[in-house]
């Protein structure tokens, strides 16, 4: 659920995942992403599912050199958390 404008201009630098439960082959899941704005949001476990959007980078400026995103994967039907994560993105080098 990463915003396309970030994928076009940046590359993944680091990923951290925290698994909570497994999902099954036929389970439908929601993949939500939120732009991390500062140190006050450094712990993704402190955020509710409502803090995330699906593929939207509201407030993201694709001209920025680095981004950090928080990710939340949940079961669509029950809303149970499958995992949380954080990704760090850096601007792609000029070719």
Image (spheres, rainbow, N blue to C red):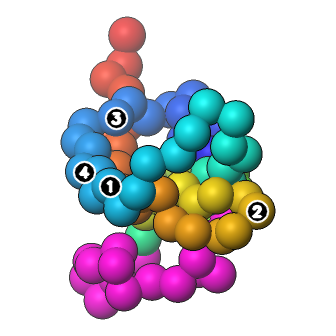
Residue picked out by circle 4: 16
The part of the chain drawn in magenta is: 37-53
Please tell me which residue is depicted at 32% across the width and 55% down the height of the picture: 19
Q: Nearer the viewer, residue 50 or 69?
A: 50
Which residue is at a point 64% across and 81% down the rendered structure image?
Answer: 50
When the figure is inspected, residue 22 is found, relative to residue 59, above or below; the finding is above
Give the position of the N terminus as an image quadrant.
top right
Per the image, label 4 sits on a secondary structure element best described as strand
Which one is earlier in the sequence, the residue at label 3 or at label 1? 3
From the top left corner, tell me how far across and down residue 13 is, in percent: 25, 37
Crowd around label 2: few <14 · some 14–19 · many ≥20 (10 Å): few
Within-10-Å neighbours for mark 3: few <14, some 14–19, many 20+: some
Where does residue 37 sit, x and y in percent of width and height? 42, 76
- Residue 25 occupies quadrant: top right
Any part of residue 56 in sight:
no
Residue 81 percent across, percent down from the top left = 51, 66
Q: CA distance from mark 4 to mark 1?
A: 10 Å
Which-is-in-front pick, marks 3 and 1?
1
Which residue is farthest right?
A: 77
Q: Nearer the viewer, mark 1 or mark 2?
A: 2
Spatial distance from mark 2 to mark 3, Cα to Cα? 30 Å
Q: Is residue 91 left or right of residue 25?
A: left
Mark 2 and mark 4 lie on one chain; the one further toward the N terminus is 4
Q: Quadrant of residue 12?
A: top left
């Amino acid at each position: 659920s990463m915003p396309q404008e970030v994928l076009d201009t940046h590359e993944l630098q680091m990923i951290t995942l925290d698994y909570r439960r497994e999902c099954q082959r036929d389970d439908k899941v929601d993949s939500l992403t939120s732009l991390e704005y500062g140190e006050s949001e450094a712990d993704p476990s402190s955020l509710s599912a409502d803090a995330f959007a699906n593929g939207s980078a509201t407030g993201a400026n694709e001209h920025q050199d680095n981004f950090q995103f928080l990710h939340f994967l949940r079961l669509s039907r029950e809303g149970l958390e499958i995992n949380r994560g954080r990704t760090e993105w850096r601007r792609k080098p000029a070719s």
